[in-house]
Image (cartoon, grey):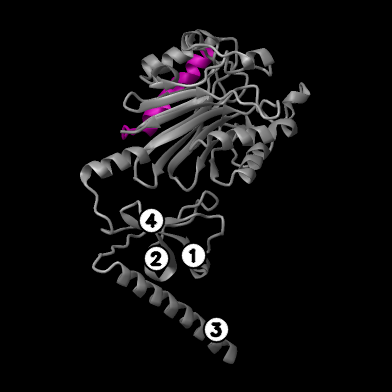
């Protein structure tokens, strides 16, 4: 009985301490009025979890940010984690709008424009079980994959040919990123098959909606059509930028390498139809992938003409390094070639980033870096900075 009383007293003391912190916070904010919103509990590991409203002031620790017009509250207390039965790897963010700092309209507009700039990378990392030469061995190049991502620090990465344990390795060494997407067999944790996964900085974005679908006559079923060598998929994610609330769609895909161009054209048609269906709101769109199609190929032309998408490489305000190719097969000479933009357009580049016409492409670059002489993959990553209106 005494132990129960002791626990009750400890709990009461804890809550009293929280209330004292709240009082100090309110006092420091003077006449500022604080309005707390409810927030949703979302976890990719707990899709059945329901949204909940909680007493924010009693449950959260606080911190203030001088550059934003608000107080960002984060890090759930142990008691809240216990009450809601959530795991430690679930991340929550909640923002209380306040009038701590008053900004003029032009100042706020400029800041929001910067917030709505994001960098996106397309990266075919080559499936981990490829053993045709020692250069292909994952254990010999995995460090280079991590280093090139660290070096460019993209906000979102559309990954192709990634096997689950390769994605595990990347996330273990790059803790900023979370993962979304299922494999070509339709499973999230498939150990042997490939993903067109989407990696994103979890402190910058919230996943609003998403799916992995098949580039076939039956997109919702595990399937392939038209003589495609493999099941081909696309992962679609609707993101929200936490700092601004701006929403957009991001797609990662890989078309088949069949010698028949009609296969890729049909897969592209499915991609465009699904894109239109998902994005009925007309939000900004960014598409990244390995299309096995050069700029003059039917699949590329279908995306830009019928799909009204813009190729980031040709529409960027600034073009950085351009290599002799985007897929080099560990050819050292190809990796050293630096070509002008006109030649880049005419060569057989298969990796592309596209965006909707209203999204401004600020820069584009082919990432040709090597690390201790090691190339991360048979494909160079490509990276673009885009700005949403």
Q: Position of residue 149 (x, y in %)?
A: 58, 35
Structural crowding at the residue carrying mark 4, measured as other residues with C-alpha within 10 Å and reported as few (<14), some (14–19) or many (≥20): few
Q: CA distance from mark 3 to mark 4?
A: 35 Å
| Residue at the (74%, 29%) spot, across then down | 137
Q: CA distance from mark 2 to mark 3?
A: 23 Å
Q: CA distance from mark 4 to mark 1?
A: 27 Å
Q: Is residue 90 above or below residue 351?
A: below
Main SS category, magenta section:
helix
C-beta proximity under 8 Å, tags 2 and 4: no
Q: Residue 38's quadrant in the figure? A: bottom left
**Going by the image, does 225 lie left or right of 133?**
left
Q: Would residue 168 be counted in the magenta stretch? A: no
C-beta proximity under 8 Å, tags 1 and 2: yes
Mark 2 / mark 4, whichever is N-terminal: 2
Q: Closer to the observer: label 1 or label 3?
A: 3
Q: CA distance from mark 2 to mark 4?
A: 23 Å
Q: Would residue 279 be counted in the magenta stretch? A: yes
Residue with the most extreme left position: 105
Mark 4 / mark 1, whichever is N-terminal: 4
Q: Which residues are magenta?
A: 262-283
Q: Secondary structure at mark 3?
A: helix
Quadrant occupied by the C terminus: top left
Residue position marked by numbered label 4 in the rendering: 65
Q: Position of residue 294 (x, y in %)?
A: 51, 12
Viewer-side residue, 319 vs 45:
319
Residue position marked by numbered label 3 in the rendering: 7
Q: CA distance from mark 1 to mark 2?
A: 10 Å
C-beta proximity under 8 Å, tags 3 and 4: no
Residue position marked by numbered label 1 in the rendering: 84
Q: CA distance from mark 1 to mark 3?
A: 20 Å
**Going by the image, does 35 lie left or right of 89?**
left
């Amino acid at each position: 009985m005494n132990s129960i009383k002791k626990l009750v007293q400890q709990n009461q003391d804890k809550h009293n301490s929280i209330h004292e912190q709240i009082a100090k916070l309110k006092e420091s904010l003077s006449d500022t009025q604080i309005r707390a919103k409810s927030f949703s509990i979302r976890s990719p590991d707990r899709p059945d979890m329901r949204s909940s409203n909680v007493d924010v002031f009693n449950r959260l620790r606080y911190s203030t940010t001088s550059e934003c017009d608000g107080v960002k509250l984060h890090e759930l207390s142990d008691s809240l984690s216990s009450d809601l039965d959530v795991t430690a790897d679930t991340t929550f963010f909640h923002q209380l709008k306040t009038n701590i700092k008053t900004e003029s309209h032009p100042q706020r507009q400029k800041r929001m424009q910067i917030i709505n700039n994001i960098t996106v990378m397309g990266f075919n990392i080559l499936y981990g079980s490829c053993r045709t030469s020692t250069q292909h061995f994952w254990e010999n190049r995995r460090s280079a994959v991590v280093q090139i991502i660290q070096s460019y620090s993209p906000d979102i990465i559309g990954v192709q040919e990634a096997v689950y344990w390769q994605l595990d390795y990347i996330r273990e060494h790059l803790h900023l990123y979370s993962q979304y997407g299922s494999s070509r067999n339709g499973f999230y944790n498939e150990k042997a098959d490939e993903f067109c996964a989407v990696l994103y900085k979890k402190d910058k974005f919230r996943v609003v909606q998403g799916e992995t679908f098949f580039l076939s006559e039956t997109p919702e079923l595990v399937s392939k059509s038209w003589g495609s060598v493999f099941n081909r998929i696309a992962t679609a994610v609707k993101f929200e930028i936490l700092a601004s609330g701006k929403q957009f769609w991001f797609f990662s895909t890989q078309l088949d390498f069949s010698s028949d161009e009609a296969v890729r054209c049909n897969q592209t048609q499915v991609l465009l139809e699904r894109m239109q269906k998902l994005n009925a709101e007309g939000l900004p769109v960014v598409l990244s992938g390995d299309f096995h199609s050069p700029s003059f190929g039917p699949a590329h032309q279908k995306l830009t003409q019928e799909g009204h998408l813009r190729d980031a490489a040709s529409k960027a305000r600034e073009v950085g390094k351009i290599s002799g190719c985007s897929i080099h097969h560990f050819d050292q000479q190809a990796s050293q070639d630096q070509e002008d933009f006109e030649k880049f357009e005419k060569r057989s580049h298969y990796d592309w980033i596209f965006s909707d016409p209203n999204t401004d492409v600020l820069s584009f670059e082919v990432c040709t870096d090597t690390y201790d002489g090691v190339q991360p993959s048979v494909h160079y990553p490509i990276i673009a900075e885009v700005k949403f209106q």
